[in-house]
Image (cartoon, rainbow, N blue to C red):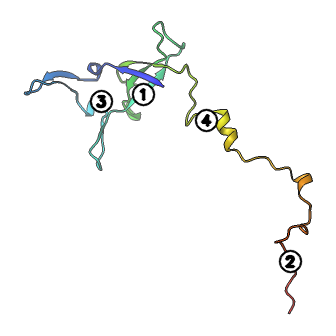
Amino acid sequence: MIRLKIDLLKITGAKTFTARDGTACIAFPLEANNVFISPKTGSHNLDLTLMRNRDGKDQYGKDGFCTVDVGKDRRLAGERGPILGNWEDLDGGNQRPGRDVSAQEATRKAPPARDNSASEPDDFDNIPFRQKFTPFQP
């Protein structure tokens, strides 16, 4: 499990305001932060990137930091997204990509190995439901 904490006010152009009903809100420009708006669903996605620290854990026990993904073109032009926060791996790096399967579960699901050398004869004469093939002759 990875725990991530981000400071929303570090998003480019983020501003706090109070709505008419008294609710505290944060707003930020969508285009400047490379927010993708889905034409099908209308969902708004802010892409983030988790980067590992070059020297491992830092002095606070964090494994890396989180930035706003500015997109390939802007990244190749040398632009970097703001660092929003830090993350730490609570499992100590023991997680592998995909589903973690215990050794006991993996061996339980594996089919047993067959030893064909001694248990089955080469010809199948002793199997009652199996008949020898005889070619059709007109």
Say what secondary structure mark 4 lies in.
loop
Question: Which label lies toward us, 3 or 1?
Answer: 1
Q: Mark 2 points at which residue?
A: 133
Residue at the image point whose x is 92% and y is 60% from the top: 121
Q: Name the residue under label 3.
A: 33
Q: Alpha-carbon distance for marks 2 and 3?
A: 73 Å
The answer to whether 66 appears left or right of 37 in the picture is right
Q: Mark 4 points at which residue?
A: 101
The answer to whether 116 appears left or right of 66 in the picture is right
Question: Which label lies toward us, 1 or 2?
Answer: 2
Say what secondary structure mark 2 lies in.
loop
Question: Which label lies toward us, 1 or 4?
Answer: 4
Residue extending furthest front?
A: 128
Q: What residue type is labelled 2?
A: Phe
Sort mark 4 into few (<14), some (14-19) or many (20+) by Cα contacts within 10 Å. few
Specify which label sits upstream in the sequence, 2 or 4.
Answer: 4
Report if the CB atoms under discs 2 and 4 are less than 8 Å apart.
no
Q: Name the residue under label 1.
A: 49
Residue extending furthest left?
A: 20
In the image, residue 9 sits, relative to residue 127, either above or below, namely above
Sort mark 3 into few (<14), some (14-19) or many (20+) by Cα contacts within 10 Å. many
Residue 96 x, y percent position in the rendering: 58, 30
Say what secondary structure mark 3 lies in.
helix
Residue at the image point whose x is 64% and y is 38% from the top: 105
Residue 109 x, y percent position in the rendering: 67, 44
Residue at the image point whose x is 66% and y is 39% from the top: 106
Q: Alpha-carbon distance for marks 1 and 2?
A: 65 Å
Q: What residue type is labelled 3?
A: Asn
